[in-house]
Image: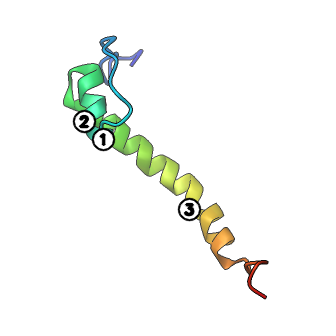
Amino acid sequence: MAIGLVPAPTGVSVPWTVPIFFSGMLATNSVLGGILQLIDVVIVGLIWFPFLKMLDRQKDPLTN
């Protein structure tokens, strides 16, 4: 936002129930805000994936 890659938020309070892409568009009045949110979700997914995979491989202690 500081370098002008995506527009700054307009100050509109978007409800948390608005889906990812659309809330970014509403908050910035630009499609680029929604695209930035999608890119952020992909980055978070890539960070979390190894941990979730490791958790999936662990044996459940409640089922002997």
Rendered-image quadrant of the N terminus: top left
How packed mark 2 is, by other alpha carbons closer than 10 Å (few <14, some 14-19, many 20 or more), is: some
Element type at marker 3? helix
Q: In which quarter of the image is residue 17?
A: top left
Residue 19 is tagged as: 1
Residue 62 is left or right of residue 19, and the answer is right
The residue type indicated by label 2 comes to Phe
Give the residue drawn at x 74%, y 81%: 59
Residue 31: image location, x then y, percent = 20, 31
Q: Distance between the residues labelled 3 and 1?
A: 22 Å
> Mark 2 and 3 residues: CB-CB less than 8 Å, in contact?
no
- Residue at the outermost bottom position: 64
Q: Which amino acid does label 1 sit on?
A: Pro
Residue 10 image offset from top left, x and y in percent: 30, 12
Q: Tell me if residue 61 comes above or below residue 33 in the rendering.
A: below
Q: Left of 23 or right of it: where is 42?
A: right
Q: Do the residues labelled 2 and 1 touch (CB within 8 Å)?
A: yes
- Which of label 3 and label 1 is nearer to you? 1
Query: Can you give x and y, in whole percent of width and height, for residue 41 in the image?
Result: 42, 46
Residue 20 occupies quadrant: top left
Q: Find disc 3 in the rendering and name its residue.
A: 49
Q: Earlier in the sequence, mark 3 or mark 1?
A: 1
